[in-house]
Image (spheres, coloured by chain):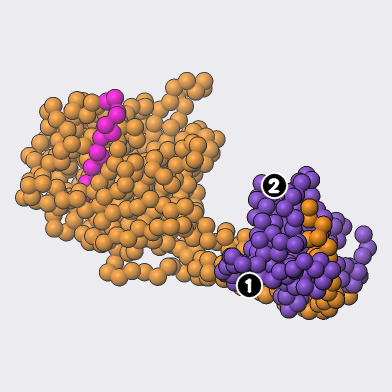
Amino acid sequence: MSETFHEFVAQRSPALSRTAYLLTGDHQLAEDLLQSALARTYRHWRRIRGGDPEAYVRRVMYHQQVSWWRRRRVVERLDPEPVERGGGDHGDSTVLRLSLLAALHRLTARQRAVVVLRFYEDLTEAQVAEALGCSLGTVKRHGHDALRRLRELVPDLVEATPERSIR
Amino acid sequence: MTVRLREALREAADVPAYQVHERAVRTARRTRQRMAAGVAAVLVLVALVPLTVRGGGGGLAPAGSGGPALPDRIGLPVFGALHATDRPRLGPASVIFSGQARGLTGLIDENGTIGVVGAEADRYRTYRVGHEAPVGEQVLLSPDGRRIAVPGGTSEHPQVDLVDLVDGRVRPLPSPVARSVLMEPAGWAPDGKSLVVRDVVPANPEGSAYRNVLSLVWLDTGRAVRGLAQGVQVPSFGAPVAFSPDGARVAYQIGDEVRVSQVGGTADPIVPDFQPLFSFRVSSDEGLAGKGAWLPDGGLALVSRDPESTRWRLRRVDPRTGKDLGRLELPAVSGVTTIRLLGWRPDGSALVVAYRPEPNAPARFDQPLELDQRTAYGHVRSVRVLALAPGAATPTTVLTAPEQVLAVDVADDVVRSGRVRDADPPWGVGGRFWWWAGLVALLLLGYVGIRWAVRRARAPRG
């Protein structure tokens, strides 16, 4: 593969930016996260450019985000009340989007990573486990906990029907 | 179902692409430079410390104070200890020791390493003999502590290696006896200019029998100046050897006979080679006391065992006849396989090596047993150096050693000084370890530097 680092960043920045934003829920943090992941990718570019550099960047972002989350010692606050309901108007996408972002903030970094990987990147649980470097059982547990909490926070987002696992 | 969640995530992720390319590249380069600088700093530190320590020029290591003294204990050589010929030079030694403790043998087989302790401070060195060789019997420290005589060479070319602790050189002393297959040092002359050596020579062309030859060799010419004894192999052939303080006479034991030969004082010996001046027999429970057997008054000291006991004491005999001149008024030493007399201190006390028996040894030490068997490694658990003071009821321990240190030799100058110092044996790892660690660190530094330069040259520019 003769793709240069610059070409790679130019082509994949939009998609990577979206993932970074979903993982952090904050533009500034998302920029920092992507920059950090790309810097690490640049240092190892010779080794990884022949493989799947995008997967590498995503993996770095997931782990970096978890690491930052731990370092910041974010105190999880389980709010018994939904933070912002979408109400009955499912067409109000802005409200729903804000509700989602607020709800994602209530998840742990690992839970949010599982949500992003599973429902935004559309990876299987096995692929998520591989990307996060954890066991399948851990992914299931985080996914289950994340959906349960999202269901509590934004009931309109997640229907009560259990998610069927695709391994 | 999570259709809405998926849709919401896609909507929420509708953000512009962040322009972080330049910043990411700058961050990566900065991180790489910091890492390289950090690694280089660590490697340089690791490399410089041992090289500075070891490469202190050819001079002697800093001396302690107060002149040569006996350390009150010895420790085992540390892993990676400097060798006797390494820089900085050790200088004269006070004590050498050997045995089967850690650091004195190989991992799998015996490699006969001896430990060497500096005369004035606890600087340790090692010297690899290559086979089991008890110090004081087969490896001898010179009277001034400057040289160690070690059996060396091959059966075709036997020799004694003279290891100089001051200049770090090893000088070979070839065998003076034709057809010799083994050569060992047996005793240093008081002035350090000559050495009694023991050779093993085939007694017939088939090599089915051997005889021993004991000779006095001048070290400056390497030639034998006096044949002392020759004969069939017997236990204790030329062991121990004791020079009179003026170096004119030498006493040695051949089997159950103690002989005295004249070796100095005149250019032409009064008696021919291999003819002793005097000789007398000793019983199975006694023998020539050791290298310090000559008494200040011209008498000769024997070690003797009290009947049916493991209690040993020194007694005085006439060197001409072996006539008993009575016990010396020194305390006896109990519970040992034997004792070996190193010499005499200014206060009149005798310094002896005491051999504590190995509890699992099959031999009985309260029964007659050859003296060379009483100091054999398998029969000894540990050794101590004791001072036997005139009139004292019990011996005074002046040097202790870890278990399985099975032999010690002390320089005559240190014995005569009468000084004992508080010991502080080294711990951790030795100078050779640090030297090799420094070398490896330098190589790694070079490798990391080259790799960094190559990667920088190949690094993506855009």
Instruction: Please tell me in which quadrant of the rendered image residue B210 appears.
Output: top left
Is residue B409 left or right of B42 when viewed as pictured? left
- Place residue B375 in its image quadrant: top left
- Point out which mark residue B185 bears: none
Count neighbours of disc 1 (C-alpha within 10 A) and say few if under 14, some if 14 to 19, many if 20 or more.
few
Q: Is residue B360 magenta?
A: yes
Q: Name the quadrant of the C terminus of chain A.
A: top right
Segment tinted magenta in the rendering: B351-363
Q: Which shade of the palette goes to chain A?
A: purple
Query: Left of A112 or right of it: where is A78?
Result: left
Decide: is A9 above or below B74. below
Q: Is residue B270 visible?
A: no
Viewer-side residue, B214 vs A57: A57
- Label 2 Cα crowd, 10 Å radius (few <14 / some 14-19 / many 20+): some
* Residue A107 screen position, x and y as percent: 65, 64
Q: What residue is at 17 percent from the left and 43 percent from the top?
A: B300
Left or right position of B96 against B315 = right
Task: Give the residue drawn at x 42%, y 62%.
Answer: B90
Q: Residue at x 52, y 20 (%)?
A: B206
Chain painted in orange in the figure: B
| Label drawn at residue A136 | 2
Quadrant for the N terminus of chain A, please: bottom right
Amino acid found under the numbered disc labelled 2: Leu
